[in-house]
Amino acid sequence: MNSQQQARFDQLHTTHLNHLTLQGKRPATIDARAVRRITAFFDCLPDRLSLVDLKIYFVELIATHSWSAVKLDRNGLQFFYKFTLGKQYPDELQILYWLIIERKNSGKFGRPLHDELCDFYGRQEMIIFREHCLLEYEKEWGRKG
């Protein structure tokens, strides 16, 4: 990001932290890294991300992080959308919430969330979905993710 974009990010991030503080969130929640992590992942402002970008991010996050990290990022970004940007969190990403709740209720703590997505969609569908997201990202941003 250039210096102007970095200044915009700093403003958005400060506003986000202020909203978390004003709502009485715990220090660990305020320290959550969702907004910083997705900004670093794409090297662009989080308010400029499309639905395709968010899908790409979560597919990669599910493949590389624990289910609790996925849950924290999902909740953090949902809060960021609602209170900092004043936007609705994309409905298509709500499936993550239900998968996480189902996992918590079923006691399947040993299985990676990626495996459960594969149970829900099927492995081949996940591969096709990931490839589709990467192609959409390349079309929109003109670079590989």
Image (spheres, grey):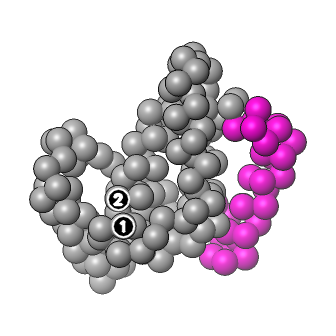
Instruction: Answer with the quarter of the image where residue 113 lies.
Output: top right
Helix, strand or loop under label 2: helix
Disc 2 residue type (three-letter): Phe
| Mark 1: secondary structure | helix
Residue type at mark 1? Lys
Magenta part, dominant SS: helix
- The image shows residue 38 at horizontal and vertical percentages of 45, 57
CB within 8 Å, label 2 to label 1? yes
- In reply to whether residue 84 is colored magenta, the answer given is no
Q: Is residue 85 above or below residue 102?
A: below
Q: Is residue 10 visible?
A: no
Residue located at (54% from left, 17% from top): 107
Q: Position of residue 8 (x, y in %)?
A: 29, 78
How far apart are the alpha carbons under marks 2 and 1? Answer: 5 Å
Q: Which residue is mark 2?
A: 79
Residue at coordinates 64% horizontally, 66% vertically from top-left? 52
Residue highlighted by disc 1: 82
Q: Residue 144 bears which disc, if any?
A: none
Mark 2 surroundings: few (<14), some (14-19) or many (≥20) residues within 10 A: some
Camera-nearest residue between 64 and 27: 27
Depth check: 66 or 100 in front? 100
Residue span colored magenta = 117-145
- The x and y percentages for residue 121 are 79, 42
Outermost bottom residue? 4
